[in-house]
Image: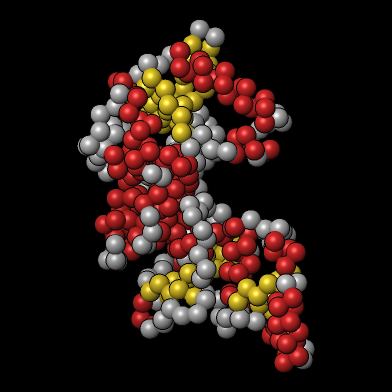
Amino acid sequence: MTDDRPPLILIRNLDEVVETRQQHARAVASGSERRLSRGVYLDSTRWNGLGPRAKYLPFVHGVVETRKSRPVLSHWSAAAVHDLPMVGPWPQRVHVTIPAASGGRSGGDVVRHPGRLRDEDVVEIDGLLVTSIARTAVDIGAFRTSMIAAVSIIDRVLHEAPFGGAAPLAQKEALPACWESMLPFKASRRALELIRFGERHSGSPLESASRVGMWTLGIPRPRLQTAHFDEQGFIGYSDFDWPDFCAIEESDGDKKYLDPRFRSGRTADQVLLDEKKREDRLRAVSRSFARWGWNDAIHPTRLAQELHPLGLPSGKPWPV
């Protein structure tokens, strides 16, 4: 993150502060610079070339670098530093955790969350003090955000690729241990329920959103990342399946077709053809098959329409 981070312009580091402020105000008015926060600017060309998370991170760094002492970044700001997924827009303020007795209030560019922090709850990344992976996941689970956004974070923290793939960012037992160390705290029950809802084999925020939708609709709990075979051999892993109903489902995001990192050197057309062949084989080993994307996953009515042909019962959410 350090090498790729665009250089910030900090007014306090420059000579002739009054004139410099006027110069940069004119640069913002002309569109050549972007004001990130009080006394912090960034070249607009660099800004315009950044993605959503990469735009939020310079803002976070700018706020930190204009503080008298280093704050402990937490919640969504910590999630950005840890490169955890965001479902929805990144926030417009920086989140920090402060001692409960400090009496600090939120204001301006900063949201302050009173709370206790153990030594193991804080790590340093690129000069920033940040809540640990486990503490960040628990904090977001207790925060007033959507269940989909929180579960996407928790699933990513726990994610473990099948059969010896990538290791999880945190072991599942680390999250309830961190939760217990924080007691008592606001929304602790919600946080624990979301931690228990987390799955180590959920492979993407789209899969997390789909599982939340299934739970909301009361669809039976699916298996995740099941290996399937036919007479030709290994077909692949399905996102969800229900063996009692001989049903398979795939959550289909755009990245596998549009992002070169997910295409393994293949063209988008070749990926589409390979996916079609894979789907045909999965359909042949199941009684029913469904595929959906983001617009279906985040709208329960549309998700129900996609799930209905699978013959799954509904109305009884599984316990967490």
* Any part of residue 138 in sight: no
> 146 or 61: which is nearer to us?
146
> 44 or 15: which is nearer to us?
44
Determine which quarter of the picture holds residue 46.
bottom right
Q: Is residue 228 above or below residue 42?
A: above
Q: Is residue 135 above or below residue 228?
A: below
Q: Is residue 58 above or below residue 229?
A: below
Residue 117: x %, y % from top left: 41, 68
Quarter of the image where the C terminus is located: top left
* Any part of residue 288 in sight: yes
Q: Is residue 131 above or below residue 160?
A: below
Residue drawn at (45%, 51%) of the image: 153
> 80 or 158: which is nearer to us?
80
Residue 292: x %, y % from top left: 46, 33
Residue drawn at (49%, 25%) of the image: 237
Quarter of the image where the N terminus is located: bottom right
